[in-house]
Image (tube, rainbow, N blue to C red):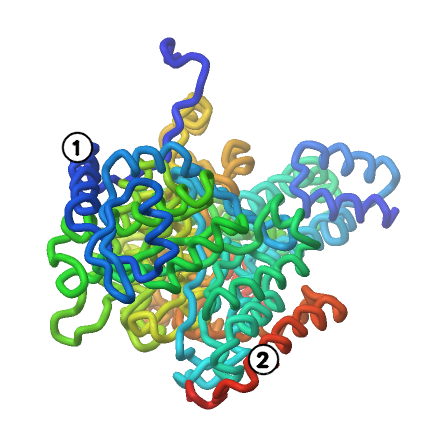
Amino acid sequence: MMVNRHNYDVNATPTFRVLSEDQIEAIYYASLRVLYETGVRVYDSEGVDVAQSGGAIVEDTTEKSSLVKVPHYMVDKARATVPSKVVVIGPDRKHRMELYKNQIYYGGGSDTPYTIDPYTGERRRSTYNDVKNCARIAQALPNYDFHMSLGITQDTAVGTYDRWQYLAMLEGTSKPINITAVDIEGVRDQLEMAYIRVGGKEEWRKGPIFTLYIEPVSPLSHSQEVIQKLLFCCDNHIPFVYTPCPLAGATAPTTLAGLLVQALAESLFGIVLSQLRNPGAQIIIGGLMSNMDMLSTIYSYGSPEMALLSAAYTDITKWLRVPEYETAGCSDAKLFDEQAAMEGAINIATSGLIGGNMIHDVGYLDSGLTSCPELMVASDEMIDMVKRILQGIPVTPEAMALDVMEQVGPGGHFMEHDHTYERFKTEIWRPKLIDRQNWENWNMAGGKRYGERVHDRVVEILEAETEPLLDDAMYQELRRVCELADARHKDEELDVKMFV
Amino acid sequence: MSEILQQITTAVMQGKKDEIAQIAQQAIDEGSGAEDILYKGLMPGMDYVSVEFKAGRVFVPEVMRSARAMLNVMEVIKPLMVEKGISMVGKVLLGTVKGDLHDIGKNLVGMMCEGAGFEVRNLGINVEPEKFVEAVKEFEPDIVGMSALLTTTMRSMGDTVKALEEAGVRDRVQIMIGGAPVSQAFADKIGVAYAPDAAAAADKAKELIANSR
């Protein structure tokens, strides 16, 4: 008997850590210096006013922008009110994300111009139906906790596609969604759609069904659109993701520590502005950090630096106690091939082991330009394996099974023991598409590669009959918001073919 | 009467290893014969478990438990079977060949064969060819199953076949082999049957019996 641990089980989740506390503090205080001395450029006069009224120094104002310098105490003040937890609940009121330290949730990525056709394998422009299909796949996969479009609806109007895209997603999934918006009007329309979907503004307040994706521009620039979206979210109880996408060696220092300092300064400005506007405003900071490939110039989604930076940033946000946006399940491969599986496995495992919160871009290929249903399905199984690892090994007298070993004895077997029978299903992870048959049985079952089995599963999901998530009346009401938006913009050049 | 046999089938399917003996006793008391209990009660239950196992819906510890339930009933009905001269599906003699101490795969085969209605004698591990010969003479099995996990001990399989030939008993039995390094090609070379895993071994045993009768 372990006397000093008499009353509890010794149970720990394996964790991974990139930065020490001293390193995190060094990065944090360095980013405060960047905010105070280098400043950030803000391209929105209302945002500049909010910052200035809170104590920021405003310099070098031009017709379009100002340099805003933020003293340290403003950050301290903002940190006192920024929520350490953000909750997003799907319209079914079942699927939920409780975003705080070490709570992992995986989901897709936003607006890719291309998708891999699930039937022909062809890379082509994505459409409304593709977005709906990706949402249906996300709905069917148990390890997808939230959804993002994984495609732009390029068969709808350019200026209003965001509403149609949201409708397509609402048709396919009842999980929380991280939306994008063309502009403030697009956010407003989608908020109205969300009210319709969830049953009114008060229901929304009890559990928002979407977060808004907002992306400031690295290095240290906050556009008018970005600031306006941030302020709108603060005013309307919309949780939002504020995620710069710095590129080591291009839009941030090539040294990863320097990139982290810059990214944190960019995020902290979002925290400061949001808390000045509405103390308690729900912000999630992130999230996509990588290196530029110095030959192809692409933004690498599969590099080890991407996984490492995301993990390091998670360490920082855990220390800050602010919910975090993280990146995994993505690759630079052009198809769902060995490279995609390899890069996806590495970044999914890293993001899970570090305890990232809202882990997005699952299903991205081609440096974020192409979505891939097959990578979605394969990632679901990779996430499942990582979750098993995260369960760790509970070390209890019962689990150490000394009495069972005594009973079985040297040379015996455990296959028939009650201890095995009662525990094998919970103790030992079981694969879904991963194959563990012997050669003969695998061969007899068709001898299919993993990719072929994944493809079959994609088709199976798409062809399964499912109950519609929206009844006809609700669908018509939601559709009307989209059509009214189209009507308002009818005099603009709404070239449907612009994307194509 | 068929209701109680159905209960036995269900108890096998659910692996009710402790309750099942009592149900079997009740069946006997109510007038069920041993043959019916075996072929209409136990075997349909094990057939179901076997199909579910191959489909990936039932797992090894559950198969073990169902097989154990069946064996617990066999204990009860064995005297009756002997009395009435009722035979099992067939007899299987098992062993891990000389030089090899690996036990688990062969034991799995044994359980699967018992579940399929065979009487199984397990000679254990590191079994010398002569031991196989003796047991064939004494136990008179329909099938001899040999197991090896090591490429180095595979040749003992050939030696055992040769020993059975030299003793003049090779023609009285069917031989099948298995184990991780063993293949159909190797089995063909030494002139025996092959099964790639335990469930396939039970099927192969049934197939060999059917072909020989």
Write down the chain letter for disc 1. Answer: A
Query: Which is closer to the viewer, label 2 or label 1?
Result: 2
Q: Quadrant of residue A303?
A: bottom left
Give the label on residue A155, or none: none
Given the current orientation, which residue lies at the most extreme top position?
Answer: A3
Q: Is residue A143 visible?
A: no
Image: A59 above or below A364: above
Residue A40 in the image, given as x and y percentages of width and height: 23, 54
Q: Name the element at disc 2.
A: helix
Residue under circle 1? A22
Is B31 left, or right, of A18 in this rendering?
A: right
Image quadrant for the C terminus of chain A?
bottom left
Q: Is residue A80 visible?
A: yes
Q: CA distance from mark 2 to mark 1?
A: 53 Å
Say which amino acid is labelled 2. Asp
Residue sitting at 30 percent across and 49 percent down?
Answer: A267
Residue under circle 2? A486
Residue sitting at 50 percent across and 60 percent down?
Answer: A147
